[in-house]
Image (spheres, coloured by chain):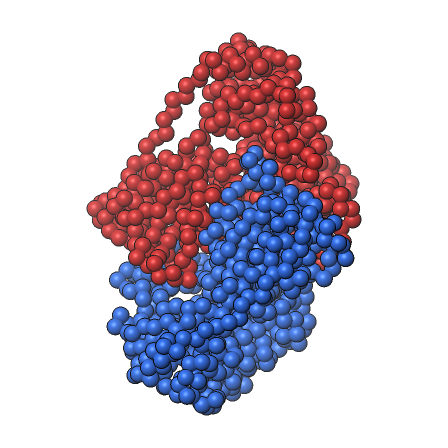
Chain colours: A red, B blue
Amino acid sequence: MDAHSNQLNGAESLVETLLGAGIDTCFANPGTSEMHLVGALDRYSQMRCVLGLFEGVVTGAADGYARMTGRPAASLLHLGPGLANGIANLHNARKAGTPMLSIVGDHATYHRQYDAPLTSDIEGLAKPVSHWLRTSTNATHLGGDVAAAVVASKIGGGAVATLIVPADVAWSSGGQPAVAAAPSATVTVDEVALAQAAAMLRQDGAALFIGGPGLLEPGLTAAGRIAEETGCRLIGPTSAARARGGAGAVGVERVPYVIDRALEALCEVRHAVFCGMAEPVAFFAYPGKPSLVLPPEAEKFTLVASACDVATFLDALADYLGASKAPSKALHLGRGARQLGRGSMTLEGLGTSISALLPDDAILVDESISASFKLLPALRHTAPHDHLQLTGGSIGMGLPLAAGAAIAAPYRKTVCLQADGSAMYTLQALWTQARERANVVTVLLANGSYATLHHEFANVGFGVPGPNAIAMIDLDKPDLDWVRLGEGMGVSTTKVDNLETFNAAFAAALREDGPTLIVVTPSEP
Amino acid sequence: MDAHSNQLNGAESLVETLLGAGIDTCFANPGTSEMHLVGALDRYSQMRCVLGLFEGVVTGAADGYARMTGRPAASLLHLGPGLANGIANLHNARKAGTPMLSIVGDHATYHRQYDAPLTSDIEGLAKPVSHWLRTSTNATHLGGDVAAAVVASKIGGGAVATLIVPADVAWSSGGQPAVAAAPSATVTVDEVALAQAAAMLRQDGAALFIGGPGLLEPGLTAAGRIAEETGCRLIGPTSAARARGGAGAVGVERVPYVIDRALEALCEVRHAVFCGMAEPVAFFAYPGKPSLVLPPEAEKFTLVASACDVATFLDALADYLGASKAPSKALHLGRGARQLGRGSMTLEGLGTSISALLPDDAILVDESISASFKLLPALRHTAPHDHLQLTGGSIGMGLPLAAGAAIAAPYRKTVCLQADGSAMYTLQALWTQARERANVVTVLLANGSYATLHHEFANVGFGVPGPNAIAMIDLDKPDLDWVRLGEGMGVSTTKVDNLETFNAAFAAALREDGPTLIVVTPSEP
């Protein structure tokens, strides 16, 4: 389409503004109030529209897409309830620092006063998960509102921008596409701050806590130079939005999820410098245990809070320290022996097999939850990859995130390590994977329970759960048949019973185009 | 358990307060922050805990349960994201006027300041869907907070009460169970208002708009008396939370969903009296069409706004009018000929078959969406039943609502008329139906599209949808295989291709205990 802007309606100016800003992918689940937006999207073939059959799929996929491209996709959501269904994965995206741009339809401005069935307080719902929030009020301003939302979505490296578009703003004429200003790239590194960080990191018990793009190149290399020069530890968050991992990446410890393990791991830290990561805190509170997991006496200093500038600061700090230009090989993770796991389906064995078979430059989407404790160690020494984790703790991220990541990077393989309880939250994402022929191999870890809750129930001293607790913790009775669920969504699915059959199925799946689901039942809880 | 209250922790006082108020069913999806609530629920075997594998199932089932019992179930939700996942069906419950009591766990009070991964503004998320909202601040007050929430959930016949319970409030000792005050039952009927309503209803072009319990007995009988005495029309909302229907019920017209049909149906109304129902408005706004569907010149008067008092007001109005004690037979719906549909799977034929086979006193849960236009007419003359509809327009209500309704009324048959697009939102409810052996027969109408959006796309003049519009409207490529999806959730599922096989499958399903899913593909869009 090559319409003149004076002929555009609001919806068309919205789409032209998005395309002008390089946003050409829209994850969507629209309804009647968004019909003029659907009509406008239909007029621009440059825009790729991807349907999710539930809004948690839409927002989760947009998160995955943006983590891999560094730029937002658009999400199109239907009124307050459509937004509400997407909030859990917006929460995860918000905690990930992902650039997100949600367009939420609303009733026509004059219709809202009548409290129609689908009327709700959309701004009220959006506020808790949005860094930036605006309701557009007329078609002529809509292009400018979209441009402002695009800019807002990139603040601090990535933010959640929500733009509410009433139906009449979309359908009225007078749309004016606008240009989204490029974010300012000037980063000022304060020498006093560098001196402070450098002095701390040269002490005994020093740790550099790194988050955001500090866990990607070139941040990791800079961090390695700093560690080599100072002897400090490098520590990342329990879960990161995206981290480079596997052979060749500078090794970074992670704050353990389990509170007692975290306290143990960090008890010797005396000097903590934060770079794109906040002070680590316990995931949950427990009676008699602290919220902060660093020793209270540790000295703490934040070099940079905002995620986007991390690599610049790390580089400047390495230079300030006079570190060598590249860290020595010892600081890089090595490739493990490419051995396949054998025999019964232990989590360690499974990790060993995946580690051996993972192709170079895979995207590893990880919602393995309780299985991660035993799965991930082997995956430290696998092929180079990007590791995408659950940043906000809101389960139901894995399958949608994998769909979005694979759509963003179609020529890479996306491997999704997915627990069953969390998979059930957004299993509709399998259908989107099938429709989009997304190159995702999902390893579905079907232990038939919220295993984390079993641990936690025991942790707080309740002993053996009784019938009511079991009713809320176990997912059996009936067992979920994941082969049928996967096939029902159009994804080629196999169930394997031991590591030999897993190895064959996983290797075959990696050779396939389009999505595959491999169901495994670990031989241990 | 028979603990003395001075030994209780907050969580135990919560459970004892619920049980004391007659709330003995808890739909739940808890997490770590609710572990002491899980522990407490585990100690009281009188409480029935029902797990939903997604929170939209939890809140939808609680809605269905309360619509059938008239009293709230408890819902247990995990932090902000768990609440967010339940909001769409809370929205529907709010618009239904259902008594709802959501208990949402939060981090310990002292932990919230640290912005742990799962920290969010729970009050902010809850506010738009809650009539009543409180965050409990200490264990000793928790019992009283629960009692206040129970009372609040019954205000106006049914309201959404949300109580946020921080983990330390649950785990601290000093819990004191409290007694929920019975709501005051005094209804004052104003004679001046009765005179006004009576005078209006005796005019030509008079209509009595009835909602809430006015659509159940004894409200319907009173409405029938009024209609017989005055000649007024009886009109209900497009979608009602619960309405008595089928043979023997006083017939009530409904405001049509499609705007043009609604304008047509109501164009002759000159005097409108509202009784537990607000003035009807268009479901959506459309360019050039009005929001209000009654003629602007119609005289309007609200006799009673609150849903709970409708029957009392209708009775008083009938008496005031000097109406006969019972409406004549002509005003009651009759039983249609018990003919079975035959041949290809038309929606009319399907409606005819269901109408013929529906058992007495069934619960008809209806999320048939676009299919309803052709399905429901035949069902006006079926066996006596309760008809439960989608009140808030937020799709994904049917399967959870049916689960909750069947749990509330295990000796009745629940028949769920369910469109496929909306079923996909909360298909996890099938598993809860299977686990609870809920007596639900679901007729899954698999047309493979958001058919409503096809209509709407054409309605707004966009003609034939192009590739992007089709990508957001059709659910095919790949087709969802509902037989596998149903079986994967543990529900006995069959697919039928014509009305003869449907008739046999539906009759068989009605004889079964536990849930059944029958997949039909209508022969028309």
Residue A339, how many percent across, how many down?
72, 32
Q: Is residue B254 above or below residue A266?
A: below
Query: The C terminus of chain A lies in which quarter of the figure?
Result: top right
Residue closest to the far left: A6
Q: Is residue B471 above or below residue B254?
A: above
Relative placement, left or right, of B6 versus B487 is right
Residue closest to the far top: A322
Q: Is residue B497 above or below residue A501?
A: below
Residue A95, how many percent across, how many down?
52, 37
Residue A356, how many percent across, how many down?
67, 33
Q: Is residue A163 visible?
A: yes
Relative placement, left or right, of B163 versus B261 is right
Q: Residue at x 51, y 12 (%)?
A: A195
Residue nearest the observer in this picture, A253 or B348: A253
Residue nearest the observer in this picture, A32 or A377: A32
Q: Residue at x 56, y 52 (%)?
A: B163
Total numbered labels placed on residues in the image: 0
Residue nearest the observer in this picture, A319 or B127: B127
Q: Residue at x 64, y 43 (%)?
A: B168
Residue A287, how many percent across, how many down?
69, 39
Q: Residue at x 52, y 14 (%)?
A: A196
Q: Is residue A388 visible?
A: no
